[in-house]
Image: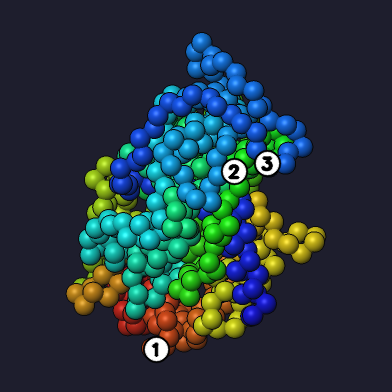
Amino acid sequence: MRALATVLVALLLVLSGCSGVLSGETTDATTTTPADTQTASPSPTTTTQAATQTPTTTPRPDPESDVLGWENGYWHDDVLSVTTDDGLNETELDAIVARAMARVENVRELEFNETVPVEIITRAEYQNQSQEEYSDDFRAFDNAKFEAMFFVGEDRDALDVQNTNRGSNVLGYYSPKEDAIVIVANSDTPSLDAEGTLSHELVHALQDQHYNISSISRPTRELYNARNGLIEGEANYVQRLYLERCGGEWECLEAPESSGGGGVPDDFHWGIYFLNFFPYSDGPGFVGQMYRTQGWDGVNDLYANLPNSAEQVIYPQKYGEDEPTDVTLEDTNAGDWERVIPESPNPDQERPAYASLGQSALSSMFAYTFTDSYNQSRVVQPQEFINYEDNGRVNSSDPFNYDLRYTRGWDGDRMHVYKNADGETAYVWKLVWDSPEDAAQFVTGYERLLQHWGAHRVSENVWVVPEGEPFADAFYVSVEGDTVTIVNAPTTDDLPDVSETAA
């Protein structure tokens, strides 16, 4: 376990420090007032950074009209006399942002319609930002989802755990509501971690200007990961192409020595990390496949025909060919069990009264078992989920494999959540698969998952996790053809009242 922990710590540092894939958190959160942007005159000078191809050091005149690769007085290959060790003043930041916008344009072959404000804040400031207010029903609904994935037990609040995870690893975000970017600095000075995070978030701003990504519907976890596979996948893909030019065609900023990560916090949750990381891991491959076959025009067309499942992102060949099943689920609850209908904390975004988790969530659920300290058993081995290269290093561009044997063949799922007068929750989760064999394979993995968390079988279809364990509950698990039904309740006596299926 110690060797695996070392690998995971190194993995987190590599992903957050080099590839910048943690930087994209497309959100509607209100941010502090962005720094004013000003048009700066070009005054490039040489730099001490070595380059295999000398970037432009001679000032060129501004074009008569805006063109790709030029923004606010700076060309994409201009050189700036800027150091980041002592932080960035307003003029330096404006120049860096203008040049970075020109570079994103040059790579993506798409023009910015307007300048993007950028603000740099400390991690402490980010963590102290106020969170959204949630109703009791919304919290109960969210808690049930994360309990169903065996991520967060009933003794903790799932929203709090997610916010803690996010506060420790987000490097920046674009706010569609403010049309602005916020960079989270790990140092106490307002600086940048080179240009990776900035380029990533500028892609989000570009996406919003052209495709209005804030209006894209992502009401369930399944659609959130599916469509973020496009949004974050494109941002990561463009960021990668951008950084490949650094040190060659382009002179780029170097990260300050103090900007490195400080390790993994004790309360860091790997399962939630795996779940949220999916668009950054598999999204670039999905977008890259489209770019290689149809160019940027093909990527543009994706916004008119969005991916409808994480499965389509995992397997790009299924995009447009294998649509997920619209799973139906009838409520048969009785006694004092009532359906939980969550209200969206954002009145501008509708949320359905059901959950759908998808293949990326199921794979994260199984993978989490090799990271938790609760039980030494593992439902999948680390090498099944972590993509190691031949040299033993983790593939930093695609570190995780969400195509697991227990989740292969997913075709749709739907979950209803219930609550009784004592505030206890229960759920019915129906999953449809491509074939009976795929459904049976999932059940095999799910029963191993139950055993990992301390469950024992009490009848053919019923399992119980005893009191005192993290996920103490009763579970009814059945498979009929290509359909699996899971009923969860506090006790075996409650199962029939939650669903007639478990009678």
> Which residue in the structure is indicated by mark 2?
253
Q: Nearer the viewer, mark 3 or mark 1?
A: 3
Q: Amino acid at mark 3?
A: Thr
**Residue at the (63%, 66%) spot, across then down:** 10
> Which residue in the structure is indicated by mark 1?
468
Distance in Å between CA atoms under marks 3 and 2? 11 Å
Classify mark 3: residues with Cα within 10 Å, few (<14), some (14-19) or many (20+).
few
Quadrant housing residue 145: bottom left
Q: Secondary structure at mark 3?
A: loop
* Residue 427 place in picture, x, y as percent: 36, 68
Q: Amino acid at mark 2?
A: Leu
**Residue at the (55%, 27%) spot, across then down:** 43
**Residue at the (51%, 42%) spot, across then down:** 198
> Which residue in the structure is indicated by mark 3?
48
Quadrant housing residue 37: top left
* Residue 460 place in picture, x, y as percent: 50, 81
Query: Is residue 175 at least partly visible in the picture?
Result: yes
- Image quarter in which the C terminus is found: bottom left
